[in-house]
Every structure is written in structure tokens, then in C-alpha cells.
Amino acid sequence: MTAANNPFAQVLEARLGQKLASHSAPLGEMTIEVLPENWIAVARTLRDDPALRFDVIVDVCGIDYLGHGDTEWDTSDVSSEGFSRGVEGAGPGRFRWEDRPRPPHIPRRFAVVVHLLSLEHNRRLRVRAFCMDDELPSVPSLIGVWPGVDWFEREAFDLYGIVFEGHPDLRRILTDYGFVGHAFRKDFPLIGNVEVRYDPDKRRVVYEPVSIEPRVLVPRTIRDDSRYEQAAAERKAGK
């Protein structure tokens, strides 16, 4: 549905104006994109404007788009009897840490996504902002708009390394105090960096380098779900 025949999209365009970078509604779910410098202003408008009233923040999460859209499934050098499951994956997270790839700069690798709910208007909205710096991804903290984002932003910081400027207590919340790296980043090794075990001789927990070999059981692949195509065709036919 385009903005021309989507009343909600028209309301967003009217209330946010130039602060609205783009919007789309795949599968009927409205998503808007804003720039980090407009993050706080858009959040306040979405919360306070009588036509919007998004007073409940459901979730805040990070996204790493490194390798987005890439596939590892070998479809060229395989037999006619099926796809090979022995393909050695080359995607992010499937390699030794010391041999990790250094991909060329990928514009706007990290993003922050906020899921909002308006109880008054019974609407949901997804808001996304891309971080401008891949080396130190950051966006302003929303804790002054929705205080409940405190631990959500700490989780995104812990797992993705996204800095929320202005957060009063931005520190790890899920990983250990001495944890190195950010586990949900696509270039973080799937087998991790260290092994943890209890040493009965030393009578304490010890940290050691990972001893297992990285391997791929199910290579990454991209599939289109025919159910969505059938549903779209049925809607178009008026069934």
C-alpha cells in the first residue's frame, strides 16, 4: 500500500515532515526510517502528538547488516542429485578469529530499531535509524522519552556495541565482566573466543582458547516463502 492510499502513512508524513527519511509497509507493518540527528525529536513527536500517541515502547534492538543478502549455499559446483552440505561457509562468524575477513567499508552497517505501540489508536510502528559510523556506532539514548528503554539499550550495547549517547548507566547486562567483543555482531566467531571450564586441580574456573574447529552444518541461504506470494496473489484477485 502506497502513501497515497495509506491514511497512517499520510499522518506520519504530515506530523514528521522532513524528519521522516522514508517509510514502507511490507506485509502491512509500517516501518519508518529517520536520521540519528532526528532520533529524539521524532520520538517525542510520536509519543506526544494526539494523532500518534505511541506511549508504549515494546522493544529496542540492534541490527548488524554485515553480509546481509549474501548466501553460502553452493549451487554451481554440485551434482545433479542435490545441493552439497559440505560447503565451507565464508559468511560472517564462520571463520577463525585471527583469519577473520576485513571487508571493504559497508555503508551504514549498524542500525537501531524501536518497536512502538499506541494504546489509544491501537497501532504499532517500527522506527529505524542507521548509525553513521561503523567503527563506533551510536545514536542518542531514548531514556528521556521512554524511561523503560534503560535495559533494552544496555542489551543492544552489550551484544552489538552500539553506544547510546546520554544513557546514564551504559554497561554490559548479559555477558561476563571480562567478555571481549560483542556476540551478536556478524563478524563475531560462532564458536566464540574462549572456553570456560572448572579446573579441579586449580579449584577454580579457567579461561582457555577455543579448542574446537569451526565448521558449517547448514550454510546460509536465501529462500522466498511461496506462502507470501500466494497470499499476495489471492489479495490481488480479490479472494
Image (cartoon, rainbow, N blue to C red):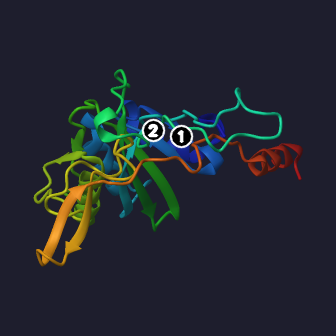
Q: Secondary structure at mark 1?
A: helix
Question: Which image quarter holds the N terminus?
Answer: top right
Please tell me the numbered disc located at residue 235: none
Of residues 32 and 61, the one nearer the viewer is: 61
The residue shown at (62%, 42%) is: 86
Image spot of residue 41 (x, y percent): 27, 43
The residue shown at (28%, 36%) is: 98
Q: How many marks?
A: 2
Of residues 154 and 4, the one nearer the viewer is: 154
- Name which quarter of the figure residue 83 lies in: top right
Instruction: Mark 2: give few (<14), some (14-19) or many (20+) Cα within 10 Å.
Output: few
Please tell me the numbered disc located at residue 14: 2
Instruction: Mark 1: give few (<14), some (14-19) or many (20+) Cα within 10 Å.
Output: some
CB contact under 8 Å: marks 1 and 2: yes
Of residues 24 and 86, the one nearer the viewer is: 86
Q: Is residue 153 left or right of residue 11?
A: left
Rendered position, 117 above or below 109? below
From where the camera sits, is residue 132 visible? Answer: yes
Image spot of residue 236 (x, y percent): 83, 43
Image spot of residue 2 (x, y percent): 63, 36
Please tell me the numbered disc located at residue 10: 1
Image spot of residue 103 (x, y percent): 37, 25
User: Which amino acid lies under the numbered mark 1 shown in the image of this protein?
Assistant: Gln
Point out the residue furthest to the front here: 201
